[in-house]
Each structure stands twice: as structure tokens, then as C-alpha cells.
Image (tube, rainbow, N blue to C red):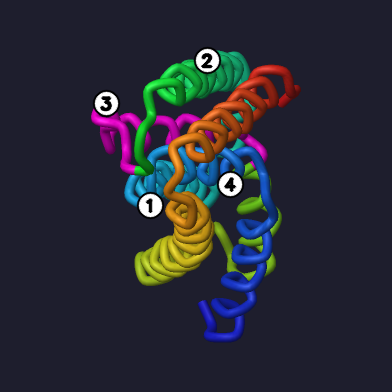
Amino acid sequence: MTATGCLAYALALGFAAAIPGPGVVALVARALASGFWAGMAFAVGLILGDLTYLAAAVLGLSRMAEALGDVFVVVRIGAGLYLGYLAVQLWRSAARTQTVTGRQGDRPWASFLAGLTVTLANPKTIVFYLAVLPTLLDLRAVTRRDFATLVAVTALVLIAVMTSYAALASRARHAFQGSAFHRRLSRGAAAIMAGAAIWTVARRA
């Protein structure tokens, strides 16, 4: 993989990742409600999901992904229900919130799992890799070095984009210390999360 191809891939991925989709929206909602580190745990899940689809594209598993359409439906519904559960938890916690600190019930693995399922529930992610990668290298002759480069570039680009979103959301969260405002903020985050849940379940393929 050439340096030019690597740069082109990084730019294409960065642009695609920066466009607010359901994953980014849910990440922002998570960071608004529970803080930067909860948002980053969510982001790690999103990134792992992307790397899973990247590996599938490189290893030529796109046909298998198509054959497992019913499985994707189940994963999508499960992801939507889980996001809905998080939305309900955020809404209920808003009434009990007194400060802008994270809720005691927050667990990094819960945010991570939510991020992972959101990405895996979106088979369009693999379409991006299948559309971009063939223009950069021959997928039938990918070396270990090429694959390692793709993984590293993908992780770094996504970390940069997702960290920016999480940091901005967390800064907005901590900019206001009033419990009344934070209660409205938590409920707003819950509404955003609920919207992402509905979109995840209702959309087709």
C-alpha cells in the first residue's frame, strides 16, 4: 500500500466518519449524559465494529455478510433495543441528577457494548470498505503489512474523530453546573439516544 493510497484512504475515512450518523449521534448523547470517558468507551466499541468490517472486507467475507442478512436484522433490532434501554435509563436518572458528574451506575463495558452493537447493526459500514479498498490495493493480494497499515490508519482516524466529538460533548456538559440545566441536558441526551434507537430498528438494511 503506497503512501499516497494510505493518505487517500485516511481522508476518505475521516470524511465519512465525521458526517454525523447514528453512531456519532449516540456517542454525543452518551458523552453529554455521562461524560467524556463514557463517550470514549462507546467510541472504542464503534471502532472495534469498524475494524471487524474492515477485516471482513479484506478477507473477502462480503458474500458471507450478505448471506447472513437475517442475522444482521437480529443484531440491528438488538442494538436498537439496547439503545432504547439506555435512553430510558438516562431519562429516569435526570430526575435524580444533582450535579454534572457521571451516574454511579455507569459502566465502561455498557458504553462499549452499545457502541459495538451500533456499528455491527449497520452493514452499510462494510459497503464503505468494499467501495474504497479496491481502489487502493488488490484485495486478493493483501499482505500482512498492508492489513496492519489499514488497521492502524483506521483506528487512528476514528479515534481522532470520535475523541473530538466526545470532548466537545463533554465540554458542553461541564459548561453548566446548574442541576436544572443538567436535568434538561440529560433528558435531551435521552431523546437523542431514543431517536438513534428508533432509527436503528426502523431502517431497512
Q: Is residue 105 above or below residue 127?
A: above
Q: Secondary structure at mark 4?
A: helix
The residue that appears at 43% across and 61% down in the rendered structure is: 159
- How much space separates mark 4 and mark 1, taking CA atoms? 14 Å
Q: Residues within 10 Å of mark 3 (few under 14, many from 20)?
A: few
In front here: 194 or 3?
Answer: 194
Which callout, 3 or 1, points at the residue further toward the start of the chain?
A: 1
Q: Are marks 2 and 4 in contact (CB under 8 Å)?
A: no
Q: Secondary structure at mark 3?
A: loop
- How much space separates mark 2 and mark 3, taking CA atoms? 19 Å
Which callout, 4 or 1, points at the residue further toward the start of the chain?
A: 4
Q: Which residues are magenta?
A: 101-124
The residue that appears at 62% across and 34% down in the rendered structure is: 123
* Disc 1: which residue: 36
* Disc 4: which residue: 24
- How much space separates mark 2 and mark 4, taking CA atoms? 18 Å
